[in-house]
Amino acid sequence: MTWPTVTVSQKNRYNGTTNDVERVVLFVGYGDTNTNKTQSISADSDLDKALGEKDSLLKRIVAAAANNAGQNWFAYVHVMPEPDPSDDDYNEDDAWMNAVTAAQSVASVEGITLAFDATQKATINRATEMRETLQAKFGRFVWFAIAVGGPSEGESWADYQSRMAELQEGIASPGVQLVPRLWGNEPGVLAGRLCNRAVTIADSPARVATGAVTALGRDDLPEDGTGEKLDLAVLQGLQANRYSVPMWYHDYDGIYWADGRTLDVEGGDYQVIENVRVVDKASRRVRLRAIPKIADRSLNSTPGSIAAHETYFGKPLREMSIATQINGVEFPGEVKPPKDGDITITWTSSVAVQIYLIVRPYESAKEIGVSIELDTSQESNQ
């Protein structure tokens, strides 16, 4: 005999929106105001109040980022106190790594810009390690942009390129970019360009239609330590050595950006920052959909469950693939729409399941060849 009852339960299908961390960057550098604090800033922020009235590299880089990011820019800044010159035990890498770790309680970001000049391989290696640590400890996928100083006094462009080649040689790090400060503010310029909402995260900073870069730090071409002006060959050589640099086109006004190079290995899939960003975004979205499925028996090895969850886990890719058409011109989504077989679910045991997703980026023309043919065959008939 059963007592008559009615039970109403509310189910959560986890089809809502998630907070975007894309286009949000954490800047870490030295200053004398609000030290050891993580602050949120926007284009409306008074940098004199946030970072101090004193001129600093951090302040210039953040200002350049705001100038290139366009509307609705938002970021975080963590100010490290200037080191005591008499402190022989001070370790810069420990300082910025502690700053990044402390910022995690406040800031969830897609990228971190180190707004001080790295001079040793150790800093690059620590950034590589920190990227892995943030993934393992917080489940956060973060890229790094590291500032590198320009030529020193008396150093020629040739010597500078040799020194830069040595600095990055032998390092494999798909999520790390090296940004030389030849004009002065390049790390901020690149960070701002990547955060510009006029384009998607799948667009390269080399995209000319985005417009010329601004607030580079000086109005004339940089010079080396001997007074020789910069030319495109130097920039091309730096990019060949995996540095992310500005560039220009002869007879075309403005300064633009070359490829957003990373320190991925030769032949790797993540040699450019846009590939890193789309896969990082997909990883964040899929992780948030996987967590609610822990010990949920609706995810099982039956054909119906597998088919349903292929659709469930494919949702982030479908959202990222949404295209927009304006005046007959189609602007593609961040990735191509997933095809049959792009999401695969495999049970390896009764308690372990592997979910495989294929992310397909769109083609992006960075080398354009134009052939022009003169046809005079019908000239006599005109």
Image: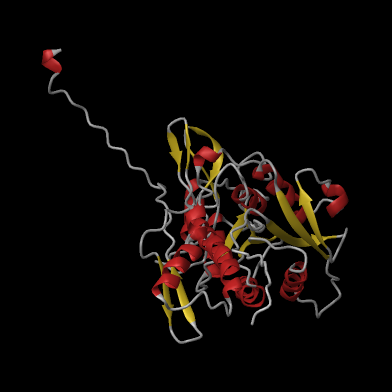
Q: Residue at x 54, y 68 (%)?
A: 168
Say whether residue 53 is visible.
no
Q: Which of the colour schemes (rainbow, by chain, secondary structure, one colour) is used?
A: secondary structure
Q: Quadrant of residue 139?
A: bottom right
Q: Quadrant of residue 117?
A: bottom right
Q: Residue at x 51, y 56 (%)?
A: 274
Looking at the image, is 209 positioned above or below residue 359?
A: above
The quarter in which the N terminus is drawn is bottom right
Looking at the image, is 158 positioned above or below residue 120?
A: above
Q: Residue at x 80, y 76 (%)?
A: 90
Observer-nearest residue: 63 or 69?
Answer: 69
Picture coordinates of residue 45, whole percent (x, y): 81, 46
Q: Residue furthest top?
A: 382
Picture coordinates of residue 329, whole percent (x, y): 43, 35
Say whether residue 67 is visible.
yes
User: Would residue 71 be found to the left or right of residue 368 on screen?
Assistant: right
The quarter in which the C terminus is drawn is top left
Q: Quadrant of residue 10?
A: bottom right
Q: Residue furthest front?
A: 1
User: Would residue 34 be found to the left or right of residue 334 on screen?
Assistant: right
Picture coordinates of residue 257, whole percent (x, y): 54, 47
